[in-house]
Amino acid sequence: MRRRLLAQAILLAASLAALPLPAAAQTADEVFDAQVLHEVRLLINSKDLQFLRANFTANTYYPADLTWGAQRVRNIGVRSRGAGSRNGVKLGLRIDFDHYTTDQRFAGLSSLVLDNLVQDASMVRERVAMAFFNRVGVPAPRESFTRLFINNEYQGVYAIVEEIEPAFVARTLGEDTGYLFEYHWIGAFRGEDLGAIAAYKPLFEPRNHESDADGVLYGAIGDLFREAATSDATTRERIERFLDVPAFVTLVAVENFLAENDGVLGYAGMNNLYVYRPAGSTRHRLLPWDKDNTFLQIDFPILNRLDDNALSRQLFAFEDLRALYLDTLDRCARAAAEEDWLLNEITRSAGLIADAARQDTRKFTSNEEFDAGVEYMKAYAAARPAFVLGSLAALR
C-alpha cells in the first residue's frame, strides 16, 4: 500500500513538474527594457486592417489582440497615429488597452505608442534622445525597440514609447490629479498672445478633465501667454505665476544640445510637447515628446532661436536664467561625453536593431541609408560635446 501511494505521489509530482509554469508578473520596466529587442504581435481582422491602412489619416479605432512574450491582451483598441510620419504602409500605431474593455491594463499601462521610425534613417534618434533627457534629469517617456508583426507578417522595427498620460505624470512628477494637455501643431505659434481662451483649444488638447469648463482648462494657459506678451519690471514675476521657469529653461537647453529642430523653439514654432499643470496651481510644466528630428547638425548654434519665442525672449533677458541655460548646456555636453555615454548608447542601440532594420522592407530608406544614418549619429556623438563646450567658452 505504501509503495503504491509513493508511486502515485511520484507520478503526481512528475506530472505537475511537466505543466508550464505560470507567466511571471510583467512590468512596464520590462516592456521598456532598452537592452532587449522585443517582439510584439497584433492580431487584427483582415478587413479592419485593410480599412486601417486605407484610412490611415483618420483616428478610427479597430479591435485587436496584442501578444508580448507569454502575455496576450485581448480586445484592445488600435488606431493610426502620427503627423508627418503617418502613412498606410508602415503604420504608426496607438494602442489603448481600455478602449473596449474598461480598466484593462497591460503591464500596468492603459496605452502605449508604436512609433514607426520612418522619419529617421538611423532609427535610433527617438529612443536615444529620450534616454538622454532622462539621463540629465528631464522627465521623458521610456522607450525600447521591438519587431512588430501584424497577423504574422513582419512590419519592421518600431519604438515602444511610453504614452504621456496621468500614470507617466505620477511616476515622474509625483502626482497626477492636475491638468494634462497634448500640444497640436496647427500653425507657427511662437508663444504670442492669442487673445480669447477659445483660440488655445485647437492647440492644447486636454488628456484628462475633458468635461471641465473652458475657463478652467484654458484660462491659466491664456494668462501665461498674455503675460509673456508684455514687458515691464514685473514681467518675470508674472510669468513665473504661470510657468515653471527653471524647468522651461532646462528643457530648452537640453533640446538645443540635441539639436532639436522641431521642439519648443522649433523652426515652425512650438511643437512636440505636452503641458502639465498641477492641481491647485496655475504653473505649467512642459514635457518633451516625439524626438525623431533631433541631432539635426553637429554645429547647431547654442543660442538658436532664443529670440523667436515670446517666453524665451522675455526670460533669457535675465542674467541668472541665461546662466542656467548655459550651465545646462555645459552639463549636457559633459554628460554626453562622460565615458562616451552618447556614442556608446548610439552604437549599442544601432547594433541591437541592425539585422531587424535591414529586414524591414516597409521602412522609407535603404539599408545603405540606414548605415549612413548610424554613422552620422556616431559622428554627432563624437563631435557635438566639444562644439558646445567650445561655443560656451567663446561666450564666456
Image (spheres, rainbow, N blue to C red):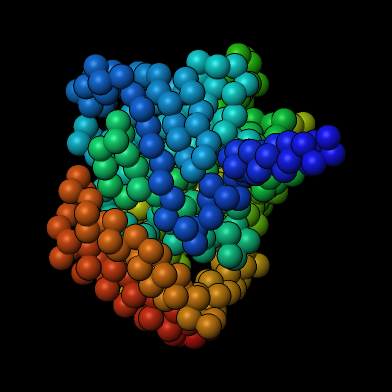
**Residue 300 position within the rendered picture, expressed as x and y whole percent measured from the top left:** 35, 69
Q: Taking 186 as reference, is 330 left or right?
A: right
Residue placed most toward the observer, 194 or 36: 36
Q: In this view, does 367 lie above or below 23?
A: below
**Residue 122 position within the rendered picture, expressed as x and y whole percent measured from the top left:** 28, 61
Q: Please identify the quarter of the rendering in which residue 49 is found.
A: top left
Residue placed most toward the observer, 74 or 12: 12
Q: Which residue is at 69% across, 31% downward?
A: 178
Q: Is residue 60 above or below residue 13?
A: above
Q: Taking 79 as reference, is 279 left or right?
A: right
Q: How many circles with numbers are drawn on the protein?
A: 0
Q: Is residue 267 above or below residue 46?
A: below
Work out which residue is located at the far right of the displayed protein and give it.
2
Residue placed most toward the observer, 237 or 175: 175
Q: Which residue is at 32% across, 50% downward?
A: 157
Q: Which residue is at 50% across, 15% downward?
A: 100
Q: Quadrant of the N terminus?
A: top right
Q: Is residue 326 visible?
A: no
Q: Taking 237 as reference, is 214 left or right?
A: left
**Residue 165 position within the rendered picture, expressed as x and y whole percent measured from the top left:** 58, 35
Q: Taking 390 as reference, is 44 left or right?
A: left
Q: Please identify the quarter of the rendering in which residue 91 is found.
A: top left
Q: Which residue is at 44% across, 45% downward?
A: 160
**Residue 34 position within the rendered picture, expressed as x and y whole percent measured from the top left:** 49, 58
Q: Is residue 4 above or below residue 382?
A: above
Q: Is residue 365 visible?
A: yes
